[in-house]
Amino acid sequence: MAVEAGANILKAPMPTTVIVVEYDPSWPALFRFFYERLARTLGSMAVTIEHVGSTAVPHLAAKPIIDIDVLLADEADLPAAINRLANIGYGYQGDLGIPGREAFLAPAQDTPHHLYVCPPQSREFQRHLAFRDYLRAHPEEAKKYGDLKRALALEFKDNRSAYIDGKSEFVARMTDRAMAAKARV
């Protein structure tokens, strides 16, 4: 996404300790809190605001961090979205090497969460939804994923990169299945 020159990009260190916990039934309500604030802030710029990632899948073990994707109505709205989000404490981080989604650092006083703003037609947005929906529809695969994450968190407790690398093949395989199933519909 093109961003006007001078956009303030914040670089924050990634936490190194990996903690995976059992599903918390309060996660949907926490997402709803963020949803309402983001909807008020972004207004008609946001086509949809989605709870994605493991905390969006009932009964799935996860890092206790809510993942949120916002789909913009128009790519040209990104600079205004950056400004509006900055006004409520979010720090713009750029795409962090993943085209099709722009990352934001959550306000320091908030419960930890990841916020991504995506342009219309974002492949990453579609992949996030497909992965979430596939795991919701296939609890046996969600269980395998939870088991894998628990094992990786124990093995790589202090190595976030190794934890992410360890689950990447599973995530890619499930996302590919989900996207293929979605294409058949």
Image (cartoon, helix red, strand yellow):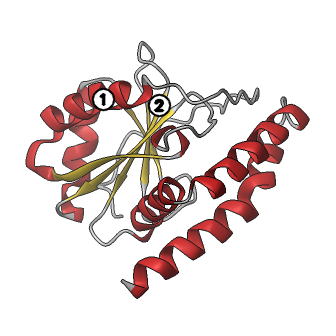
Circle 1 is placed at which residue position?
Answer: 34
Locate residue 100, reporting x and y percent: 43, 64
Element type at mark 1: helix
Element type at mark 2: strand
Determine whether 77 is above or below 123 in the image: above
- Could you give the CA–CA distance between mark 1 and mark 2, rounded to whole angstroms? 9 Å
Q: What is the number of the mark on residue 113?
A: 2
Badge 1: how crowded within 10 Å, few (<14), some, or many (20+)? many
Which quarter shows the N terminus?
bottom left
Which quarter shows the C terminus?
bottom left
Locate residue 94, reporting x and y percent: 46, 50
Farthest bottom residue?
184
Disc 2 marks which amino acid?
A: His
Q: Which residue is rendered at x = 39% and y = 39% of the image?
A: 8
Left or right of 60, for residue 66:
left
Farthest right residue?
155
